């Protein structure tokens, strides 16, 4: 894939996290090379629920120097507030501290800063940030969701602050996360799908780095981390636990846009190839499967093509599903392209129903935040609520169009 300008990466790796081995940057590089993984983002984080920070000594603010440019090891950060949700912060020059908030009975008990403020700090230093291990198979309301579920994602997507969401991860469910991601796309966000395994490499029996990964297209013969991160944030990528996807909509690649008139027709083509057996290949339009091809023969290659008449602005993507297999090291085989955005008559992509879903979501969070009495400063509470109400307004404007 690298010879064709596609570079694989894992956004979420804990080199040392509860195991019995002392993993160094060179160890992580060796693991990445063994898995044919081009970019290994080590994520520095506090250990489980306590204040001990793992791998702090390995942070440089740039990739670890090495003569092999095709295998990059970069120690970045997982920011881990239990209420708002965990994020991978990448391409950092400085770590964001504290590493977590919202721990009742401690100095960091208040829900401040929110993730939106953290993402602004990341952007100020030229980095990118996004949500990790987001949701289970069936999305629950954000208050009932367990710690680490991506409660704040719709807020930061609406405000254009979240740069990606790890749709593929071994600890969350790809279809459950995709269901929420589709609603974000339907309401005008262009947040791309990415992948982060959340592997803990110092544990002797654990899924490998790159079990879920993004293949990012830079088109360059040599890997450059900055170019890779920019291309990933632009959606020029697909995520996978095995299958390799090629995808085209009227000559446009993943993450790109095609401008058409209402009534025009676009041509969709997709190919999936895999070392693991697949069940089916599906074409998804605005969150709905509009075409599916079942795997036949050895079930390791599937092709699909479709002409679609455009009625309104929207998006088109493709995904692969397959059975659980030991070598894939995930709950089932999965791959998903980022969409091509089809803009008809210059109109934005909108969905009043999905916007109403997020209005209700944010209202629940506003009520929960407003009820808390453990704020260190009342201005902090006001700032968080103002951010959430701003995002609510983005969705409410679409609801008004129903």
Image (cartoon, rainbow, N blue to C red):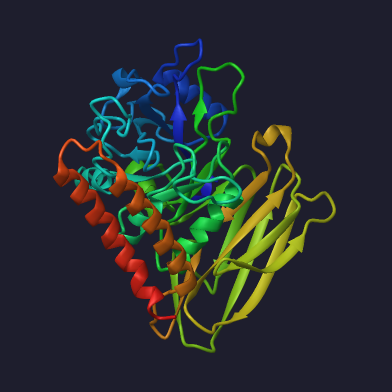
| Foreground pick, 8 / 180 | 180
Q: Position of residue 376 (x, y in %)?
A: 18, 35
Residue lying at 49% horizontally and 38% vertically, measured from the top left: 146
Q: Is residue 160 above or below residue 313?
A: above
Residue at x 70%, y 66% (from the top left corner)? 304
**Is 252 displayed left or right of 304 in the figure?**
left
**Please, is residue 135 above or below residue 261 in the view?**
above
Is residue 338 among what the camera can see? Answer: no
Residue drawn at x 44%, y 55% is 192
Q: Quadrant of residue 73?
A: top left
What is the quadrant of residue 46 in the picture?
A: top left
Q: How many marks?
A: 0
- Percent coordinates x, y for residue 180 in the rendering: 51, 56
Examine the rendered structure and indicate whether residue 66 appears above or below residue 9: above
| Residue 56: quarter of image | top left
Task: Left or right? Give the position of 308 relative to 92.
Answer: right
Q: Position of residue 113 (x, y in %)?
A: 24, 41
Frontmost residue, 282 versus 188: 188
């Amino acid at each position: 894939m690298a010879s064709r300008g596609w570079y694989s990466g894992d956004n979420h790796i804990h080199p040392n996290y509860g195991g019995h081995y002392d993993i160094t940057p060179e160890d992580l590089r060796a693991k990445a090379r063994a898995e044919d993984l081009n970019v290994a983002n080590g994520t520095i984080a506090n250990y489980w629920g306590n204040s001990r920070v793992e791998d702090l000594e390995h942070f440089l603010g740039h990739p670890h120097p090495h003569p092999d440019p095709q295998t990059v090891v970069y120690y970045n950060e997982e920011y881990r507030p239990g209420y708002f949700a965990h994020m991978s912060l990448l391409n950092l020059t400085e770590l964001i501290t504290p590493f977590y908030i919202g721990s009742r009975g401690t100095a960091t008990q208040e829900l401040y800063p929110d993730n939106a403020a953290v993402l602004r700090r990341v952007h100020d230093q030229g980095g990118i940030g996004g949500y990790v291990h987001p949701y289970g198979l069936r999305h629950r309301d954000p208050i009932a969701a367990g710690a680490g579920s991506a409660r704040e994602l719709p807020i930061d997507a609406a405000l254009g602050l979240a740069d990606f969401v790890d749709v593929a991860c071994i600890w969350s469910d790809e279809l459950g996360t995709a269901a929420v991601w589709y609603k974000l796309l339907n309401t005008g966000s262009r947040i791309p799908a990415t992948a982060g395994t959340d592997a803990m490499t110092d544990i002797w029996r654990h899924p490998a780095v790159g079990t879920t990964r993004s293949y990012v297209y830079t088109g360059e013969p040599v890997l450059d981390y900055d170019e890779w991160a920019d291309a990933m944030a632009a959606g020029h990528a697909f995520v996978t636990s095995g299958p390799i996807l090629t995808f085209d909509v009227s000559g446009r690649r993943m993450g790109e846009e095609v401008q058409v008139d209402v009534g025009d027709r676009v041509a969709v083509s997709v190919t999936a190839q895999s070392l693991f057996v697949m069940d089916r290949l599906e074409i998804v339009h605005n969150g709905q499967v509009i075409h599916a091809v079942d795997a036949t023969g050895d079930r390791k290659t599937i092709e699909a093509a479709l002409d679609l008449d455009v009625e309104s602005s929207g998006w088109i993507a493709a995904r692969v599903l397959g059975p659980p297999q030991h070598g894939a090291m995930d709950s089932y085989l999965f791959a998903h392209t980022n969409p091509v955005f089809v803009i008809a008559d210059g109109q934005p992509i909108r969905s009043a129903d999905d916007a109403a879903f997020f209005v209700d979501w944010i209202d629940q969070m506003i009520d929960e935040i407003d009820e808390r009495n453990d704020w260190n400063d009342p201005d902090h509470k006001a700032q968080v609520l103002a951010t959430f109400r701003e995002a609510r307004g983005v969705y409410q404007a679409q609801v008004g169009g129903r």
